[in-house]
Image (cartoon, grey):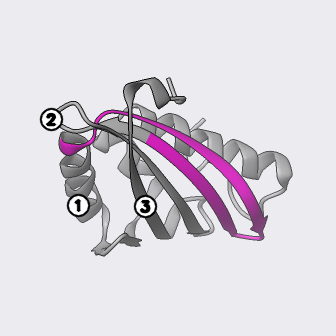
Amino acid sequence: MTPTSLKPPFNMESALQKVQMAEDAWNTRDPERVVLAYSVGSVWRNRTEFLRGREEIKAFLQRKWAKELDYKLKKTLWGFRENRMAVSFEYEWHDETGQWYRSYGNELWEFDEEGLMRERRASINDAPISTAERRIL
């Protein structure tokens, strides 16, 4: 499946598939692949960063995964309607010193008629964890 295989309006099955596709793509940690799920003019708010367009998103993802080493993500659908979804997530990663973190967040997604995400709003908090506390392996 490709990001445009599932187009709005979403039903339960297609919304769950869309979330799983996003999780799978992000877990590749490949900015070239991930960015293809977003419209050319996609607008993001990620923590305190505001991004516009695939090139800014790709540069952001490259910076992110250079810092967040061994990143592993789990997404959960919270709700959907027509062309919008609410998703919760958590991911684990470590920094260059070996300190592990679990990052928790919520995203609001809006899709265009082709099934590409045209808007993403993410709120995220990081919590230091020990290696023994890891649960997303």
- Residue 77 in magenta stretch: yes
**Residue 13, position as x, y percentages in the image:** 82, 45
What's the residue at 29%, 42% (across, down)?
Answer: 32
What's the residue at 50%, 23% (across, down)?
Answer: 137
Q: Which residue is mark 1?
A: 55
For mark 2, give the secondary structure: loop
Distance from disc 3 to disc 2, alpha carbons, whole Å, reads 19 Å
**Residue 63, position as x, y percentages in the image:** 18, 50
Q: Is residue 19 left or right of residue 79?
A: left
Q: Of 129 and 65, which appears nearest the observer? A: 129
Q: Residue furthest right?
A: 12
Q: Is residue 51 above or below residue 56?
A: below
Callout 2 touching callout 1 (CB < 8 Å): no
> On residue 96, which mark appears?
2
Type of the residue with mark 2: Glu
**Which range is magenta?**
67-91
Type of the residue with mark 1: Glu
Disc 3 residue crowd, few under 14, some 14–19, many 20+, Cα 10 Å: few
**Residue 41, position as x, y percentages in the image:** 37, 72
Q: Is residue 60 above or below residue 69?
A: below
Disc on the earlier residue, 3 or 1: 1
Disc 1 residue crowd, few under 14, some 14–19, many 20+, Cα 10 Å: some
